Amino acid sequence: MATVLIIEDVQPDAALLAGYLQGEGFVVHRVASAEEAHQYLAKQKPDLILLDVVLPGESGFEFCRQVKRQPETVNIPIIICSSKQGDIDKFWGMKQGAAAYLTKPVDKGELIRTARSLVGRF
């Protein structure tokens, strides 16, 4: 089973995304900040990261850039999942190293298709 780390500070959003993924067989871990995510990554490496942009402290864009600079995490695909819907936001997210950018409210089918395409079918 593929493991997904969800980094989302709005708990109802985190629960909804986790439910979508768990319902399709993904193992999900949730954290509410980039700081917590860094602590998680120091111990475990998920198959996929689902990342919000607006987080307390370090932004999702900053977090993505840092993860993609580290040799031990560079190959973990990141899906940015944000309410920021502007073309510049999407461009900037992809420039930071994200593999995909989905806007909220997230379509369940699109999320599952994107997640499966990034981790392969399991």
Image (spheres, rainbow, N blue to C red):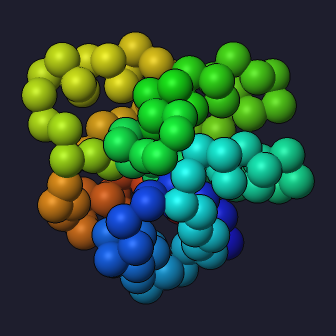
Query: In the picture, residue 23 is in which quadrant?
Result: bottom left
Along the horizontal axis of the image, is 21 left or right of 49? Answer: left
* Whether residue 2 is visible: no
Which residue is at a point 18% across and 17% down the rendered structure image?
88
Query: In the picture, residue 90 is in which quadrant?
Result: top left
Relative to residue 104, is residue 86 depicted above or below? above
Residue 69, position as x, y percentages in the image: 69, 17
Relative to residue 33, is residue 85 depicted above or below? above
Which residue is at a point 64% across and 24% down the rendered structure image?
66
Residue 111, position as x, y percentages in the image: 31, 59
- Quadrant into which the N terminus falls: bottom right
Along the horizontal axis of the image, is 96 left or right of 69? Answer: left
Which residue is at a point 63% across and 69% down the rendered structure image?
29
Along the horizontal axis of the image, is 93 left or right of 45? Answer: left
Relative to residue 57, is residue 110 depicted above or below? below
Along the horizontal axis of the image, is 92 left or right of 22? Answer: left
Residue 102, position as x, y percentages in the image: 26, 45
Residue 32, position as x, y percentages in the image: 53, 60
Q: Residue furthest front?
A: 57
Q: Residue furthest right?
A: 43
